[in-house]
Amino acid sequence: GDDLFARAVELYRQEQYWSASELFGRLEKDNSAGHVSLSASYRLLCEIALEDQAVEKRVAHWEQEYPSAPLKNQVYFNLGNLYSSRNLFSKAMAAYGKVKIGRLPLKERAAYTFRKGYAAMQCGDTENAAALFLETENYPKGDSYKWASRYYRGYIQYSEGRFEQAVPLLEPLSEVPQYASLSSAYLLQALLYLKQYERVIQTGVPVYKDADPSLRTTLAKTLSEAYFALDRTVEARSFFDDYLKDASTLTLTDRYFSGILYFKLGDYLRSAEELAIVGERQDSLGQNALYYLGESYIRLRNKVDAIESFKRASAMPYDPVIREDAFYNYAKLSFDLHGDIGVLSLYRKAYPDSPKLDEIQTYIAANYFINQDYASAVEALQTLKNPTPDNSRDLKKAAFLRGIQLYQTGSFRDAEKYFSLAQEPYWIAECLYRSNKFNNAINIWKQFIRESGSFSNPEKYRTSHYNIGYAYFKMKDYQNAADWFKRYLRLGTSDRSLAADTYLRLGDCAFAQYQHQEATGEYQHALDYKTTAPDYALFQIAMAQGVLNRETEKIITLDRLMEEYPTSSFFSSALFEQGRTYVQTNQYEKAEERFNTILSFASHSAFHAKALVELGLIRINMQNPDAALNYYKEVLRRYPDSPDAANALAGIENVYMARNDSQGFFDYLETLGIDSGKSPDEKEIMVFTSAEQLFLNNSPAAAVTALNNF
């Protein structure tokens, strides 16, 4: 058995796979020798080497019968190689994936990594492939695969458009005979894409001279394109002629290049012949071909065919620049030949910003002015290639008027753009302010104030101070706001309403900074200047007086507000505040009168809940908790969702707790379907505490009842 096995292995090593397979088959069936699984593995390796058509089934059977068989890594490696040879790269990757590279012989590891990388590349997994090729290059014993790996790494970078990375990988291969010609084509193409035309020529011409005939065609075209890009059309034609000799068929791209090359060389007849063929395409190449076909016809003095070529090019959407220029030439030739201004009008409408139409655009802009279409006037004037001083003045005027239109409709962001064009910093700041960009607005207004020209418009100069104050006010920077409002007033103004508003805002600034005495003075100035919001000024004075503990003055001020402005939106607030002030000064009867007045009028409904809470507080202060409880409960009955419901509920809880009747409080809440927010333990403690308090107050019977509830 051992001799037979040794003989079979020797045949395998001599690559006599069929004979070896026969012997391994016999050994696989003979259990006595002890080489069953190893023989099965060798037999499978022979069948893989013989490219047996049933190898997949045999591998599956082998995996099932001998899950721990030796030579597994070699089997999967060889199987992967077989699949690769049949271009079944997905299957190859699956086989390679089962190989544990650390168990392969050192001499085969580079081969394995390279072949796996190649299969990955063919499967489209170029990132993995590139990594495997790099790994192959780094193997100490992988020299035989080094340059192949380098080549494929360069090819991957090239094929994925990373030309800068491809060049340093492909360039050294020019010194490696078996890859010099193959890599040069990709190298030159990469350099061409990188627009390194001189390098294409320096590298490509020597390679071209000794290149294999199969590569000369590709290299000739690449060199022709490089020379053409450098405007060296004679050399470009020479290499292109070489390309034409070897090219089996010309593509439309070839014909386009040929047509453009002949055009540059001044051979317009041959250019037209080539471009006419390409012009049948409905794509960007066809559009470009038609454009240059038209140019060729013009130089051949064939304006009729030139019109048709430009017309067709102008109807294609692929390249807007070519389309516009073709349209212009079409319009110009139509006018030259037929006196037809219709096409020129169409061109003017389609391309109102063309620098070729300055004179027409100026006329169009004037018509837009007449029709108050300032946006279109701006658009027309902006596109003038060589505007006159009058054009520039008209542009600023149109931009300003369009800005005003947009500002008046609330389109502040759009208006800002037009005011910028009109160089109107004051109005730019206005737009920024309206867009809540207060800091930006402040900076521009300050810049406007610093400009010497701002004195030419004193009203805007003064108002800018007021506006800066308002911007600071909006940002709640009350100190700076007050400073700028005062600057505005010091400049003097004939606009009393604006002055009144300034004093009003000064009052607000002082109030916000707790300068209540100063605030009353500013609000009084606003009243003196006949502010349009006198009720607000009086209400704020009253509130400041309250903070200053001048309750009597506060009550008098609120009386004045209600007497002089009975329809004011502050009337209800004034009535309520007056009631609260009476409570604070222990004048409960007058307070009740104010709160009951609130309750008697539907117009005060927003204050009904507040009034009821205050009436409950009065009853508490007057030692009448039962009456207070009724008021509080009325709040929860009529206004359960009001902000004051929480205050009423707190009042109810206080009354019940004062009675030592916490259970009664919980029972009441239950009737309303309201959760007390107390945990069961907290409830028990409250009930027990109430019972304990009753006992301490010499009410043993009530305490017993409470404890029974507990």
Image (tube, rainbow, N blue to C red):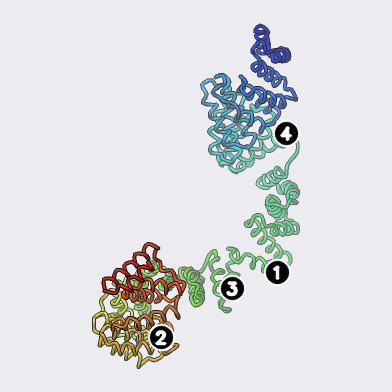
Q: Secondary structure at mark 1?
A: helix
- Residue 13 shows in this picture: yes
What's the residue type where badge 3 is placed?
A: Tyr
In the foreground, 171 or 412: 412
Name the quadrant containing residue 667. bottom left
Task: Tell me which numbered mark, 4 or 3, is placed earlier along the sequence.
Answer: 4
In the image, residue 53 sits, relative to residue 566, either above or below, namely above
Q: Which residue is mark 3?
A: 363
Real-space CA distance between mark 2 and mark 3, rounded to the nearest whole angstrom? 56 Å
Task: State the quadrant of the N terminus.
Answer: top right
Task: Return the disc, 2 or 4, that comes first in the chain's sequence.
Answer: 4
List the single residue furthest toward the top. 3
- Name the spot of residue 592 as percent of width and height, x first: 33, 88
Label 2 vs label 4, nearer the camera: 2
- Residue at 56 percent of width and 42 percent of height: 195
- Disc 1 designates what residue? 342
* Mark 3 or 1, nearer chain start: 1
Q: How many marks?
A: 4
Badge 3 marks a residue whose secondary structure is helix
| Viewer-side label of 2, 3 | 2
Mark 3 and 1 residues: CB-CB less than 8 Å, in contact?
no
Q: State yes or no: discs 2 and 3 in contact (Cβ < 8 Å).
A: no
Q: Earlier in the sequence, mark 1 or mark 4?
A: 4
Q: Is residue 132 left or right of residue 596?
A: right
- Classify 332 as above or below 597: above
Does the CB distance between marks 2 and 4 fall below 8 Å? Answer: no
Residue beneath disc 2: 569
Question: Where is residue 351 drawn, in percent x and y?
Answer: 62, 64
Q: Position of residue 633 (x, y in %)?
A: 41, 79
What amino acid type should be assigned to the residue bearing mark 4? Asp
Q: In this figure, which residue is indicated by the disc labeled 4?
A: 246
